[in-house]
Amino acid sequence: MKEILGGVTAAKGFMAASCEANIKYKDRTDMAMVYSKTPCVCAGTFTTNVVKAACVKWDQKVVHSGEMMQAVVINSGIANAATGQKGWDACVATAKAVENTLKVPYTSVAVASTGVIGAQLPVEKLVKGVEMMSPVLKDSLEAGTEAAKAIMTTDTLHKELAVSFTVGNKEVTLGGMSKGSGMIHPNMCTMLAFLTTDLAIEKSLLQEAVSDVVGDTFNMITVDGDTSTNDTLLLMANGEAQNPVITEKNEDYNTFKEALYFVCETLAKKMAADGEGASKLFEAKVVNAKTKEDAKILSRAIVGSNLSKAAIFGCDANFGRFLCAMGYSGSLFDENDVEMFFKSENGTIQVFDKGTPLEFDEEKALKIMKAKSVCVFVDMHEGDASATAWGCDLTHEYVTINADYRS
C-alpha cells in the first residue's frame, strides 16, 4: 500500500464537481457531487442519535435496499435535520434532479447535508446546484479537492486522502474526503465521510469491513461530546480495477481492509486536529487493558473530558485530570496497576507509577506538552488489549465559534 495524491476522484471511474448554490454561504462553494460512471456496490454507517436528519434516513434506505449506488450530492450550511416531511421531500427532489441530468435511477442517489439543525433547505437551489454540477463533472484530482472544500462548514482545512494497493495482480485505488470540526462525538461527529474505490467486492463483505473499521477510527474521535444528527459515512465500490471479485475473507480482503483502516484513521485524525478552535491534536493510547472495550472506553474518556482538554490547551501536566476521567468512564480497574506518561515529538515523561504520583521535571513536561500533537499514554497492566482515541484541546475559540453558529 502506498499513499498517493488525491481524494474521491483518485479511483478509476469516479468524477466530482462543486458549485456555489448560496444555500447559506454567499462567498464560497457549498454543494458537491461525486459520481461513478459504473454503478457501485455501497456500504454505510450512520449516526446513532435518535433524531436523524432526513438525509440520513434517505441514505439508510439506499444502502440497505441492496440496490447499486451511483452518485452522492452533498450540501453544507443547512443540516436538513428536524425538518419533517419537507426535509424528506428535499432529499427526493435532489435525487430526482440527478436522475434528470445524469439519467441514473433516483433510487441510486445518496444525499447528505451538514449545517444548522431545524432550517429548511431551499429545494430550488438544490436542484439548480445539481443542474450546474452535472455537466462539469470531472475525474481530475483538482475536482475531488474542490468537492472536499465545498462540504466544509467550520472546518479550517479540507480533508482528503488516497492510497493504492494490489489485489489479484490489479492495482486498486481507495480515496476519500471527510468534513467535521464541531459536534464531533461519533457513535457510528457533524461528521460526513465519502470513500470511493475501484475494487470489486461483494456488498456484504464491504459493509462488514466498513462497520468494523469505523469502530476503531471515526468512532474513536471526539471534539465536544456531541453526537450529530447527520453523521454519515458512505463507501462506493465500482469494480473498475477488474480484480477478481472478493467474495470471502481472504488475503485480498485483508489487504483492502488494511488500506481502508489507514484512510479512515488518517481522515479521523485530521478531523480531530481540526476541531473547532483547536490548537493541537490530543491523543490517548491505552495499552494492556483487560478487554478491547475497556481500552476504548478509557481512551475516549481521557480525550473527551473537558478538564483534560483544558489541561492540554494550557500545557498543564496535571495527570490527575486524566486519571479522574478514567475513573468515571465506567470501566473498572485498579489504579495501583496504572502507569501514565506524556509523549510528543519533544520527548516522553512518566508522571504516575502504579498508584504513586512521581516527581518530574516540570520544564521538560511543559516542553513535551507544547507540541502540536500530545499523547497521554496509559499502561493498565491488566491484560493485552489496546485502543487509541483522538481529540483536541479546548480553547476560548470553541465557545466563540458556537455562540453565534446559526447567524
Image (tube, rainbow, N blue to C red):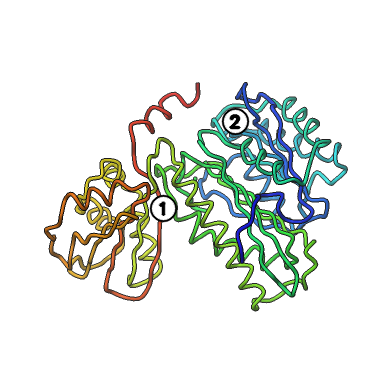
Measured in 3D between alpha carbons, the distance from the residue under mark 1 to the one under mark 2, in whole angstroms, is 27 Å
Q: Is residue 295 left or right of residue 170?
A: left
- For label 1, count other residues whose C-alpha is less than 10 Å away and answer few (under 14), some (14-19) or many (20+): many
Which residue is denoted by mark 1 in the rendering?
390
Q: Earlier in the sequence, mark 1 or mark 2?
A: 2
Number of numbered discs present? 2
Residue at 44 percent of width and 23 percent of height: 404
Q: Are marks 1 and 2 in contact (CB under 8 Å)?
A: no
Disc 2 residue type (three-letter)? Ile
Which residue is denoted by mark 2 in the rendering?
78
User: Vertically, is 240 above or below 101?
Assistant: below
Residue 367 rendering spot, x and y as whole percentages: 25, 49
Q: Secondary structure at mark 2?
A: strand
The outermost residue toward the bottom is 250
Residue 122 rendering spot, x and y as whole percentages: 68, 25
Judge by depth and name the residue closer to the eye, 100 or 156.
Answer: 156
